[in-house]
Image (cartoon, rainbow, N blue to C red):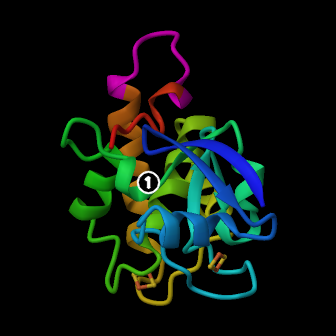
Amino acid sequence: MAQISVTVDGVAYRDEVEPRLLLVHYLRDRLGRTGTPVGCDTSNCGACTVLLDGSSVKSCSVLAVQADGRSVTTIQGLSSNGDWHPVQHAFHQCHALQCGYCTPGMVLASVDLLSRNPDPSDTEIREGLEGNLCRCTGYQNIVAAVRSAGAVMRERAPQGEPQREQAGSGVA
Ligand code: FES
Ligand code: FES
């Protein structure tokens, strides 16, 4: 067993885990973060995407021990003081989901994308989200949602401050 200290959605945890335990199973089975789904067993679909120190990762391809000393944001910690993140708002407003299975991962991957590229073209959005699969929407509304969220976030971003600091700042 290995000791890990990890902050998840703003809450600090200290746990003993098996070295082979995947981060997604630690989040779901130990911490009850079932908002992070498992969509495949091939690291292919992106449904399990979370932010690790602000960068999106597929949590089924990361070991829990690799999160030691780091900060994880799941979809359950993305809102702040009860307010949805602009990407969550945009997905809702643009009807960017149907069954919703891909949505947690799609939203978190979009947050990461916008933190690195605040004003992406449609092509850049599609390329940035190519690791996240959606079987329902045809992607068009997802692209529109990311474009819309980017516009809102650029408007709100204080001059000169990197947007990454806004991402994953949720408090559980
Ligand atoms: S569950 Fe499909 S990529 Fe992680
Ligand atoms: S909304 Fe169903 S998989 Fe994307």
Whole-percent x, y for residue 91 in the image: 32, 61
Whole-percent x, y for residue 11 in the image: 43, 40
124 to 131, vertically: above or below: above
Q: Quadrant of ligand 1?
A: bottom right
71 to 132, vertically: above or below: above
Q: Please tell me which residue lies in front, 89 or 46.
A: 46
Quadrant containing the N terminus in the rendered view:
bottom right
| In the image: residue 3, left or right of residue 136 | right
**Is residue 105 at least partly visible in the picture?**
no
* Residue stretch in magenta: 155-164
Whole-percent x, y for residue 60 in the image: 68, 72
Q: How would you rate the neighbour count of disc 1 (Cα within 10 Å): few for under 14, some for 14-19, many for 20 or more?
A: many
Residue at image point 39% right, 69% down: 35
| In the image: residue 154, left or right of residue 39 | left
Residue at the spot of label 1: 146
- Residue 86 occupies which quadrant of the picture? top left
Residue at image point 70% right, 58% down: 64
Q: Please tell me which residue lies in front, 11 or 125.
A: 11
Count how many numbered circles sit on residues in the image: 1
Under circle 1, the secondary element is: helix
Whole-percent x, y for residue 83 in the image: 20, 42
Amino acid on which disc 1 is placed: Val
Q: Main secondary structure of the magenta part?
A: loop
Magenta-colored stretch includes residue 150? no
